[in-house]
Image (cartoon, rainbow, N blue to C red):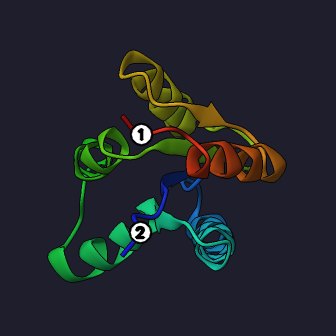
């Protein structure tokens, strides 16, 4: 089996409950596009299920839950507006030399380059 490109999908999630649920929907849609394009997305919005079943989570707990997945990703894909949380994730990615792409076309270009890299 060939390893797929691991993509941390980043977009705004916080906001009022209706806004948050709309943001979760958008993130899931973006993750679906990433998966359909042959990549392996990590979706930070999945943690909504942990919040529903495990009680209230602080903002920091959500960050602590998702950042380890960012750190093992090959690339971070940012879509839409950059929220304070996305900006924090971008800073963390930069500190760990994880490439950040900011639109769909750039992600597809990154994937092509990644697939054509010379592993030594």
Which element type, helix, strand or loop, lies under badge 1? loop
Q: CA distance from mark 2 to mark 1?
A: 13 Å
Residue 72, percent across and down? 30, 45
Give the class, few, some or many, for how many residues have Cα within 10 Å of label 1's Cα (few <14, many ≥20).
Answer: few
Q: Quadrant of residue 9?
A: bottom right
The answer to whether 55 appears left or right of 86 in the picture is left
Q: Nearer the viewer, residue 6 or 116?
A: 116
Which label's residue is closer to the chain start, 2 or 1? 2
Residue depicted at x 32% and y 79%: 49
Question: Relative to 102, is 41 above or below?
Answer: below
The answer to whether 41 appears left or right of 59 in the picture is right
Say whether residue 84 is visible: yes
**Which residue is tagged 2?**
2
The answer to whether 90 appears left or right of 103 in the picture is left
**Which residue is tagged 1?**
119
Residue found farthest to the top? 95
Residue depicted at x 54% and y 31%: 99
Give the class, few, some or many, for how many residues have Cα within 10 Å of label 2's Cα (few <14, many ≥20).
Answer: few
Question: Relative to 5, is 26 above or below?
Answer: below
The answer to whether 55 appears left or right of 103 in the picture is left
Instruction: Say which quadrant the C terminus sits in.
Output: top left
Instruction: Say which quadrant the N terminus sits in.
Output: bottom left
Q: Quadrant of residue 67?
A: top left
Residue depicted at x 69% and y 50%: 112
Residue 109, percent across and down? 76, 46
Residue depicted at x 61% and y 66%: 27
Residue 7, percent across and down? 50, 54
Say whether residue 80 is visible: no
């Amino acid at each position: 089996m060939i390893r797929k490109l691991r993509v941390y999908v980043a977009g705004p999630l916080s906001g009022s409950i209706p806004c948050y649920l709309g943001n979760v929907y958008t993130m899931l849609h973006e993750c679906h596009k990433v998966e359909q394009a042959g990549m392996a997305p990590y979706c930070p919005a999945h943690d909504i299920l942990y919040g529903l079943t495990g009680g209230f989570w602080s903002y920091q707990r959500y960050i602590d839950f998702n950042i380890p997945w960012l750190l093992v990703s090959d690339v971070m894909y940012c879509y839409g507006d950059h929220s304070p949380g996305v900006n924090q994730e971008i800073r963390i990615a930069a500190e760990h030399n994880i490439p950040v792409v900011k639109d769909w076309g750039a992600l597809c270009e990154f994937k092509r380059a990644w697939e054509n890299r010379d592993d030594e």
